[in-house]
Amino acid sequence: MLKFVKQNLEQIDGVTIYPIISLIIFFLFFTALFWWVFTAKKKHINEVSNIPLDDDIIINPTEL
């Protein structure tokens, strides 16, 4: 199976740049996510974590 994919990819010019771009996007996304987690304010985290337990919010079933 890999043999068929490899043959098709070898015919594309500049195909080696796509894995490099994918790795850079992956690395930047998780680096930004890691940074956000450690710099997020505790008050915001507590508010967001209590949303499922909050009974004050009325959900309209017709909007789901």
Image (cartoon, rainbow, N blue to C red):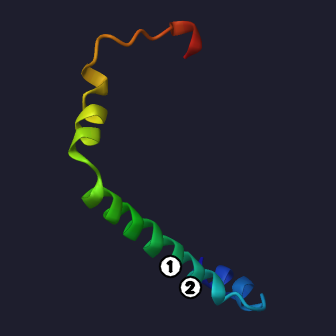
Q: Quadrant of the C terminus?
A: top right
Residue topped by disc 1: 23
Q: Quadrant of the N terminus?
A: bottom right
Relative vertical location of residue 16 with respect to residue 45 in this rendering, above or below = below
Residue at point 45%, 11% (across, down): 59
Left or right: 3 in relation to 56: right
Left or right: 61 in relation to 47: right
Q: Nearer the viewer, residue 11 or 4?
A: 11
Q: Mark 2: which amino acid?
A: Ile
Q: Position of residue 7 (x, y in %)?
A: 70, 88
Q: Are marks 2 and 1 in contact (CB under 8 Å)?
A: yes
Q: Mark 1: which amino acid?
A: Leu
Residue topped by disc 2: 20
Left or right: 30 in relation to 52: right
Relative vertical location of residue 35 with respect to residue 59 in this rendering, above or below = below
Residue at point 70%, 87% (across, down): 15
